C-alpha cells in the first residue's frame, strides 16, 4: 500500500507546475521552447522514476526462472537507458503536440526540454527518495503490524526437478527486519513455506547438505531442516543431549519456545501457543557439508567460504554442532 501511495503523491507533486501552466489562461497558449519544457518535462521525469520500471524489470528477471531455475541478469545500463528512452518518448511527442495545437510558426526545438530534464534529475531523485522514506514511516506508524514491502527472491541451486528460492520481505521502513519464506517450484506448481521472522539484523544463512540429501539452513536465530522432495521445513532444537525436529507451521509465528517434555513424556515445540509434536533426529547433522550461504544473494562455497554465524542468545535451545570445517 505504501508503494501505491508514494507513486500517487510523487505524481501529484511533479504535476503541480504543468497543471498551473495549463490552468492559467496567460500561460496556456504560450508555446516557446522553455514553456513547452516546463509543461512536458515533469511528466517525463515521472516516467523515468516511476516504480513501474522496477516492477517490470523484476517481472522480466523472473521469466527464465520457470525454465532454468536462474534469474535473468539485466545490465545496469539497460535499466537506465530504457526508462530514459521512455521519458523522451513522452516529452518530445508532447512538445510537438503543443506546438501544433497552438499553431506555432517556428519548429519545435527539443534542446531546452532535454537540458531541463537532466538539470532536474538530481533534485527529483532526492524528492523521490525522501518521499518514499516519509510515506513508509507514516504507513508504519499508522499500522506497524500491517507494514509490508515487496517480496525479494533469491534463487538457490535447483534440487532435481524442484527449483527453490529464498524470499525476504521488509517489515520496517528502515530497520533490518524481514519476513522470510522458502518457495518450491515444480513446473507451474509453487508451494511457499513461511519461516520465522527476522526481528533485527542482516540476512545471513549458511546452507549445508546432509548425508541423506536433505538441507540444513542456519541463521543467527534458527536452525531449519529442509526436505525438498516433500517440500517440508522443520525447526531443530536440542533437549537433554538430543536433537529434535518439529514441522514449521505455514503461518506468521508470533510466539515460540524450544523443545520441552510434556506430562505424557512426549517432546514438543511451542509455536503460536500450540504444542507441535517433535521427533528425535539425533545424528542427522553428522557429516554435513557446507555448500553456500545467503547474504544479499546466494554465494556457492567456491565463491564465499564458510563463515560461522554468531548465534543469537535467547531464541530457544540451538542445535549443538560445530559448523566450522
Image (cartoon, rainbow, N blue to C red):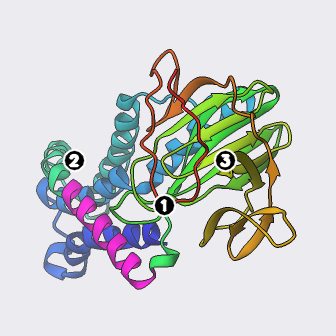
CA–CA distance between discs 3 and 2? 55 Å
Residue 145 position within the rendered picture, expressed as x and y whole percent measured from the top left: 50, 77
Q: Earlier in the sequence, mark 3 or mark 1?
A: 3
Q: Quadrant of residue 104?
A: bottom left
Image depth: mark 3 or mark 2 in front: 3
Q: Earlier in the sequence, mark 3 or mark 2?
A: 2
Q: Residue at x 33, y 62 (%)?
A: 174
Magenta stretch containing residue 142, yes or no? yes
Q: Of the numbered discs in the image, which one, if any, rests on residue 314?
A: 1
Q: Report the predominant secondary structure element of the magenta stretch.
A: helix
Magenta stretch containing residue 236, yes or no? no
Q: Answer yes or no: do the residues labelled 3 and 1 have beta carbons within 8 Å?
A: no
Q: Is residue 296 above or below residue 77?
A: below
Q: Is residue 156 above or below residue 241?
A: above
Q: Residue at x 40, y 77 (%)?
A: 139
- Residue under numbered circle 3: 182
Residue 306 position within the rendered picture, expressed as x and y whole percent measured from the top left: 47, 25
Residues in magenta? 124-143
Q: Is disc 2 placed on a helix, strand or loop?
A: loop
Residue 264 position within the rendered picture, expressed as x and y whole percent measured from the top left: 87, 70
- Residue under numbered circle 2: 108
Compared across the picture, whether 321 is left or right of 209 comes to left
Residues 140 and 211: in front is 211
Q: Is disc 3 placed on a helix, strand or loop?
A: strand
CA–CA distance between discs 1 and 2? 69 Å
Amino acid at each position: 500500500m505504501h508503494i501505491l501511495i508514494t507513486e500517487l503523491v510523487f505524481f501529484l507533486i511533479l504535476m503541480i507546475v504543468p497543471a498551473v501552466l495549463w490552468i492559467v489562461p496567460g500561460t496556456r497558449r504560450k508555446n516557446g521552447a522553455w514553456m513547452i519544457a516546463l509543461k512536458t518535462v515533469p511528466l517525463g521525469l515521472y516516467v523515468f522514476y516511476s516504480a513501474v520500471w522496477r516492477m517490470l524489470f523484476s517481472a522480466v528477471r523472473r521469466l527464465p526462472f520457470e525454465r532454468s531455475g536462474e534469474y535473468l541478469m539485466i545490465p545496469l545500463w539497460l535499466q537506465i537507458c530504457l526508462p530514459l528512452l521512455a521519458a523522451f518518448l513522452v516529452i518530445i511527442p508532447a512538445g510537438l503536440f503543443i506546438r501544433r495545437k497552438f499553431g506555432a510558426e517556428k519548429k519545435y526545438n527539443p534542446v531546452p526540454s532535454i537540458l531541463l530534464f537532466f538539470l532536474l534529475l538530481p533534485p527529483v531523485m532526492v524528492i523521490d527518495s525522501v518521499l518514499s522514506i516519509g510515506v513508509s514511516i507514516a504507513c508504519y506508524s499508522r499500522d506497524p503490524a500491517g507494514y509490508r514491502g515487496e517480496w525479494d527472491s533469491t534463487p538457490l541451486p535447483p534440487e532435481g526437478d524442484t527449483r527453490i528460492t529464498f524470499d525476504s520481505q521488509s517489515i520496517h521502513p528502515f530497520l533490518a527486519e524481514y519476513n522470510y519464506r522458502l518457495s518450491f517450484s515444480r513446473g507451474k506448481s509453487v508451494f511457499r513455506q513461511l519461516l520465522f521472522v527476522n526481528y533485527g539484523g542482516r540476512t545471513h544463512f549458511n546452507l549445508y547438505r546432509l548425508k541423506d540429501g536433505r538441507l540444513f539452513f542456519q541463521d543467527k536465530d534458527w536452525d531449519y531442516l529442509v526436505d525438498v522432495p516433500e517440500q517440508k521445513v522443520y525447526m531443530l532444537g536440542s533437549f537433554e543431549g538430543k536433537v529434535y525436529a518439529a514441522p514449521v507451521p505455514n503461518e506468521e509465528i508470533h510466539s515460540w519456545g524450544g523443545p520441552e517434555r510434556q506430562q505424557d513424556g512426549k517432546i514438543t515445540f511451542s509455536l503460536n501457543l500450540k504444542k507441535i509434536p517433535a521427533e528425535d533426529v539425533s545424528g542427522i547433522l553428522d557429516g554435513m557439508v557446507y555448500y553456500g550461504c545467503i547474504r544479499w544473494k546466494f554465494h556457492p562455497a567456491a565463491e564465499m567460504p564458510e563463515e560461522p554465524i554468531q548465534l543469537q542468545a535467547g531464541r530457544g535451545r540451538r542445535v549443538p554442532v560445530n559448523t566450522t570445517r
